[in-house]
């Protein structure tokens, strides 16, 4: 599934899981006037079955794209033919338009048809080579006759000191040039699809654009000075000025707002349906929670208390909870999750916590089990490791309602896992889960409340576009008694000194994490960096002192080593990023990170969060390989300067772009193809407010303005929410 369709799908799963949403009618409800835009692109002249595949790929579709998809594929830049440099002045790497005379042809030598066909041309300042691969000689001869004057545009490259254009985008004569648009859009392309074919397809699609009603309210149109939809589309595809295609310009912004409004409206529609069956409340009288709080060896921080109270309040509401609990590593999210589960158990229902890795799941249960036990709450763990009879017994108890709180991994959402009365799904580090898994858990119960735990502060704009008005609790304070971490960056040429220092530290009874980057698994690499470092440290400090954990180890082996480290049997734990999140050994006070320049900022911060958890002062050494790139240097600087996860996340966003923050690794907003948060951040809140206003004024999207908004929802593929309208 593409990310774009993912966001709503996610909300949809949530609403389906509610179990009380029935589309009122079957069949297409799409307004007929949109039909021309929903015709397949293969109906365009020049787009045949062969192009179908290319267009699917380009537009990220599982099936043949429609004209609407094509029209919403916006240019990235333009070719401006108004200025025509001389060959001498042409900048390699840019698109240039040159006026040249064709001098001679050099077809591939006989028998070497794979060699390129070269055409030499020139102006009074120099030469240019036009290169064609696998071209028919007759085609090139006709296109570029020797002695003729031609206008050629394409991306110039230097090849052996001579300017070269491989497969020019345009080759025209004087007359053709006069007819050519002086500004041509340049689109993201896919291998095999020529820019010319794409431009022709877009131009045809534009001519089929029907007259559509305006869906943006007059107030917003006025306030934002937006052009009409059709005008916006026309101008980004047929720009009059290069600035017409800029994302922050009026045309692109209008389309971005449309997309955001459609997204927000759909989320608001789904949200409005997330009501629980009348009379259901998922929090009890507080008796278990009191016992847990009494059993805690520490006092909850003010923000933990506030978060727990907000959650308890949500659980009592007639609307389902969708709440994000953000807190830096070590801020104490687990105990807040436990209190939420306890509230649910008090009401006689079940809760589940799903973590992305086994280590994390076990870490949670380690914190949770003793506290739950004191309160008389039944907890259990289910991962891939529980098998056979053990697993069968556990599942039977779960189904019988004998387990109050089940902690685990993906194993929690397997088909044969049946809950007696699942009422709360806690998802830890949920951006690591695929869209499908995220809410698969919620479909295991009725009107399940959702609590998402995240150590990566998700920027507000992303929360908004992803979840609509999801509620957020933040754990901003660190538990009392934590010491700041002294963080230093050193070149790895100083490794011997570092190893000596570690030797002194372990002699003084300290515990040390030694982190090595993960290497791509490959047949040729016998030992990973971590394995090599483990060997060398073991030789230096002795078997009894050093342990190793990495992702390829079996769960039980990992746990054994982690337990040895936690128990102080070994002093140095060499690890890959498996220790990144959740692992809790308060006695560890030193961390060495090798090849720190290869880690992302958020990851470094997460890793470092494994130390500084006890009362002892901690040190983090970032070893980097020289030369250090600008970006890596900037990352290491940020991590040295601050320990504030929220600031680090902001810097990370600036340095990397935000696809990465959610782990989606794509530019722009996940689920959106036109809107971008760095440019359209303002519009996101406006669209959210507008969506809420619309649903207040016209909850069933009736009348002409409702019809226009339905068009919008279909156009931007947020129409899955439309059947909800009749469900009342
Ligand atoms: P997170 O999941 O947010 O990274 P954890 O929930 O794993 O953090 O908590 C980190 C450590 O802090 C755990 O050992 C936990 O017992 C401890 N802890 C949690 N809350 C407090 C508190 N209010 N005061 C002291 N220690 C706390
Ligand atoms: Mg945690």
Image: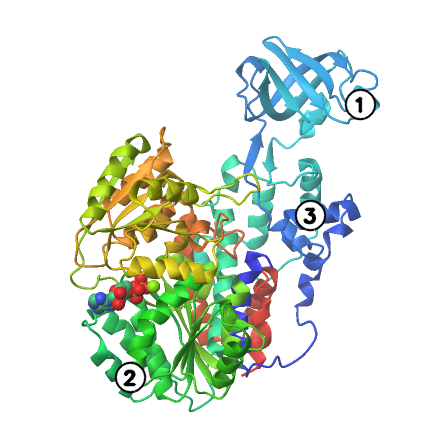
Specify the quarter for ligand 1.
bottom left
Residue 531 in the image: state x and y as whole percent: 43, 44
Rendered view: 725 above or below 514: below
Residue 285 in the image: state x and y as whole percent: 29, 89
Compared across the picture, whether 120 is left or right of 15 comes to right
- Mark 2 and mark 3: span between their CA atoms? 59 Å
Helix, strand or loop for disc 3 = helix
Check disc 1: other Cα within 10 Å, few if <14, some if 14-19, many if 20+.
some
Residue that appears at 23% across and 55% down: 612
Residue that appears at 56% across and 38% down: 524
Who comes first in sequence, dot 2 or dot 3? 3
Q: Which residue is mark 1?
A: 113
Q: Which residue is mark 3?
A: 55
Helix, strand or loop for disc 1 = loop
Closer to the camera: disc 1 or disc 3? Answer: 1
CB under 8 Å between discs 2 and 3 = no
Residue 375's disc is 2
- Mark 1 and mark 3: span between their CA atoms? 29 Å
Rendered view: 210 above or below 695: above
Residue 460 seen by the camera: no
Helix, strand or loop for disc 2 = helix
Q: Is mark 3 within 8 Å of ligand 2?
A: no
Who comes first in sequence, dot 1 or dot 2? 1
Residue that appears at 28% across and 75% down: 308
Closer to the camera: disc 1 or disc 2? Answer: 2
Compared across the picture, whether 11 is left or right of 576 comes to right
Q: Residue furthest top?
A: 124
Residue 166 in the image: state x and y as whole percent: 66, 25
Residue that appears at 36% across and 65% down: 363
Residue 397 in the image: state x and y as whole percent: 48, 85
Residue 215's disc is none
Residue 75 in which image quadrant: top right
């Amino acid at each position: 599934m593409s990310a774009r369709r993912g966001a709503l799908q996610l909300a949809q799963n949530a609403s389906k899981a509610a179990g009380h949403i029935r589309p009122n009618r079957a069949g297409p409800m799409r307004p007929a006037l949109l039909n021309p835009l929903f015709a397949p692109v293969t109906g365009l002249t020049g787009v045949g079955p062969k192009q179908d595949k290319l267009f699917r790929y380009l537009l990220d579709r599982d099936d043949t794209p429609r004209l609407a998809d094509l029209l919403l594929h916006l240019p990235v830049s333009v070719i401006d033919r108004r200025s025509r440099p001389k060959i001498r002045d042409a900048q390699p790497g840019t698109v240039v338009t040159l006026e040249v005379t064709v001098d001679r042809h050099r077809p591939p030598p006989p028998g070497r048809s794979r060699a390129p066909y070269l055409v030499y041309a020139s102006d009074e300042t120099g030469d240019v080579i036009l290169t064609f691969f696998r071209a028919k000689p007759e085609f090139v001869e006709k296109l570029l006759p020797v002695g003729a004057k031609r206008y050629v545009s394409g991306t110039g490259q230097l090849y052996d000191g001579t300017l070269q254009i491989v497969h020019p985008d345009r080759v025209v004569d004087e007359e053709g040039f006069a007819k050519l648009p002086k500004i041509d859009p340049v689109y993201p392309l896919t291998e095999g699809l020529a820019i010319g074919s794409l431009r022709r397809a877009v131009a045809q699609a534009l001519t089929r654009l029907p007259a559509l009603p305006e869906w943006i309210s007059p107030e917003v149109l006025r306030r934002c000075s937006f052009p009409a939809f059709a005008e916006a589309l026309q101008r980004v595809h047929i720009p009059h000025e290069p600035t017409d295609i800029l994302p922050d310009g009026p045309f692109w912004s209008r389309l971005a707002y449309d997309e955001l409004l459609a997204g927000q409206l759909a989320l608001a529609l789904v949200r409005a349906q997330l009501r629980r069956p009348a009379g259901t409340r998922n929090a009890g009288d507080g008796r278990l929670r009191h016992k847990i709080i009494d059993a805690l060896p520490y006092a909850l921080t003010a923000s933990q208390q506030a978060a727990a109270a907000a959650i308890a309040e949500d659980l009592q509401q007639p609307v389902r909870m969708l709440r994000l609990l953000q807190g830096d590593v070590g801020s104490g999210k687990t105990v807040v999750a436990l209190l939420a589960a306890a509230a649910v158990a008090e009401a006689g229902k079940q809760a589940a916590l799903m973590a992305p890795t086994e280590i994390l799941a076990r870490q949670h249960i380690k914190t949770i089990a003793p506290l739950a036990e004191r309160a008389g709450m039944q907890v259990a763990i289910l991962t891939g490791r529980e098998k056979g009879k053990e697993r069968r017994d556990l599942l039977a108890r779960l189904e019988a309602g004998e387990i109050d709180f089940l902690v685990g991994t993906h194993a929690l959402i397997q088909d044969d896992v049946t809950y007696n009365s699942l009422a709360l799904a806690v998802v830890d580090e949920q951006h690591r889960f695929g869209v499908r898994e995220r809410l698969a858990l919620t479909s295991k119960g009725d009107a399940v409340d959702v609590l998402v735990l995240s150590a990566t502060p998700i920027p507000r704009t992303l929360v908004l576009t992803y979840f609509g008005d999801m509620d957020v609790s933040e754990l901003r304070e660190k538990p009392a008694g934590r010491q700041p971490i002294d963080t230093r960056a050193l070149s790895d040429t100083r490794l011997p000194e570092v190893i000596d220092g570690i030797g002194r530290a372990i002699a003084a009874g300290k515990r040390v994490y030694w982190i090595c980057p993960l290497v791509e698994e490959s047949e040729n690499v016998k030992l990973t960096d971590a394995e090599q470092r483990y060997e060398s440290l073991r030789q230096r400090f002795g078997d009894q002192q050093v342990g190793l954990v990495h992702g390829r180890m079996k769960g039980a082996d990992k746990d054994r080593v982690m337990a040895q480290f936690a128990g102080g049997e070994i002093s140095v734990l060499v690890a890959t990023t498996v220790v990144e999140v959740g692992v809790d050994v308060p006695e560890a006070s030193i961390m060495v990170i090798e090849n720190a320049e290869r880690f992302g900022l958020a990851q470094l911060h997460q890793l470092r969060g494994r130390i500084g958890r006890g009362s002892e002062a901690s040190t983090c050494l970032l070893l980097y390989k020289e030369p250090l790139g600008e970006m890596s240097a900037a990352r290491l600087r940020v991590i040295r300067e601050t320990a504030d996860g929220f600031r680090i996340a902001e810097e990370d966003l600036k340095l990397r772009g935000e696809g990465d923050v959610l782990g989606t690794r794509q530019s722009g907003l996940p689920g959106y193809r036109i809107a971008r948060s760095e440019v359209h951040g303002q519009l996101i809140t406006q669209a959210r407010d507008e969506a809420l206003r619309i649903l207040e004024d016209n909850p069933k999207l009736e009348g002409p303005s409702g019809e226009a908004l339905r068009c919008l929802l279909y156009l931007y593929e947020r129409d899955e929410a439309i059947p909800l309208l009749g469900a009342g």
